[in-house]
Image (cartoon, rainbow, N blue to C red):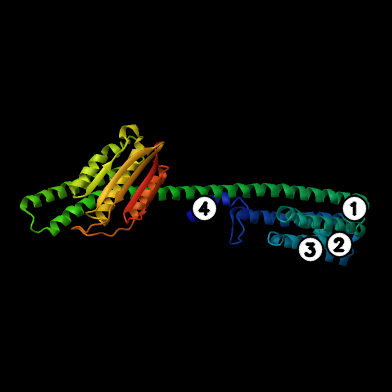
Amino acid sequence: MTESATHETGVPGWQRRLLPAELVEAVDGRRSARDWVVDVLLVGAAFLIGGLSLDSNWQDHSTLAAIVDIAFGAVVCLSLWVRREHPIGVAVGAIAISSFSAFAGGAALIAIFNVAVRSSRRALLGIVGTALISMAITPLLYPSPGRWVAQFLFGVLLLAVAIGWGLFARARRELVYSLRERAERLESEQRLRVDQAREAERRRIAREMHDVLAHRLSLLSVHAGALEFRPDASPEEVSEAAGVIRSTAQTALEELRTVIGVLRDEGEEGVVQPPQPTLAELPALIDESRAAGMHIRLNMGDARAEQLPAGAGRTAYRVVQEGLTNARKHAPGAAVDVTISTDDDLLLVGVVNKHSVTGPTGAQSGSGAGLVGLAERVSLAGGELEYGADENGDFVLRARIPCSA
């Protein structure tokens, strides 16, 4: 058996050959090695039991009756080969013929056992009723083995053994089916969890890459745009802008290397995670943006970085960083109000871009991926994010972050 087949059935090849084809989902209808052995043995057993039964009442047969008995009994024995596909039909035919053919008696018991294994309760009850009628007729045709009552009771005993054994085999199969379905369900759930974890990891990577690069690259765009639209700038101004561009590009490259390094080493023991920015680094972020020509008013209110959890402060920092990045891209030259305050157990963050003023760099288009990633980040922290234009036409970005985040 190939590796792919082993994966599909979940059972190694050598074990599969020892199981019924139904238990390994043989959708092509082929018998397993175990099925071939069982079928040959059952057909052989049916012939053997039928021969012994015929021998016990041979004196009740004429020559013609013996020929008819053997012929019909042989057909019934051979019909056991298709008992899996047609359990009811084989059982009805075997029981009907066994009422006048002693040679079919063994095959009838096996067919009844097969019905107990594979068919419904209603079908089994019908087969039992038919078998009892057949067992009541047979002693009348062949009285030699003993009195009618003794033959009938012996037949009922054999019927009870066949049915009981069949129901036991059915219970074991249903247990195997349920265990396999449970294993498949668990495997499916595990694959779903893995896919969800991978998707969450992809989103986390996208957020980290955006947070690290978008801010730095927007600063580069502002300074490069200033050089482009001011060809009359003095050499000192050009040199200063070039220095800022070089410094910003170097910082962006270092941050990118840091993120890539963390992603590569993730899961390894002993890897030290780089410190993440919090509210304590917010003034530096504001000064950096002001140096790029932005007009920013910062109001920290009663919020103090040292009094807030690192997680809440980090999320607030990312909200302000994304707000400033969007302001540079979409409203260059516009004033920006940044407000940080607390309300009970919530940290409130607001970034408001005033009416856009046409600047040297022009407005830049964006995909909105930054705000989507930011909303996911705030949601993971247990908070809420709102953004959009207000009644004055200003773009407002507000976040409510639990202080326990």
Which residue is tagged 4? 6
Which residue is tagged 1? 145
Question: Could you say where residue 329 lies in the image, as x and y percent from the top left?
Answer: 25, 55
Q: CA distance from mark 4 to mark 2?
A: 48 Å
Question: Helix or strand or loop: what does disc 2 sit on?
Answer: loop
Task: Answer with the quarter of the image where residue 330 lies.
Answer: bottom left
Q: CA distance from mark 4 to mark 1?
A: 53 Å
Q: Which mark is residue 360?
A: none
Q: Residue at x 15, y 55 (%)?
A: 226
Question: Could you say where residue 388 lies in the image, as x and y percent from the top left?
Answer: 36, 54
Instruction: Give the residue type at disc 1.
Output: Pro
Instruction: Give the residue type at disc 2.
Output: Phe
Q: CA distance from mark 3 to mark 2?
A: 12 Å
Instruction: Give the residue type at disc 4.
Output: Thr
**Is 171 or 33 nearer to us in this picture?**
171
Which residue is tagged 2? 100
Labels 3 and 2: the sequence-earlier one: 3
Res 275 seen here: no
Kindly report which numbered mark, 1 or 3, lies closer to the viewer in this rendering.
Answer: 3
Question: Helix or strand or loop: what does disc 3 sit on?
Answer: helix
Most distant residue in the left direction:
235
Compared with 303, 83 (above or below) is below
**Is 75 or 122 nearer to us in this picture?**
122
Q: Residue at x 36, y 50 (%)?
A: 373
Q: CA distance from mark 3 to mark 4?
A: 38 Å
Residue 191 relative to residue 271: left or right: right
Task: Answer with the quarter of the image where residue 40 lies.
Answer: bottom right
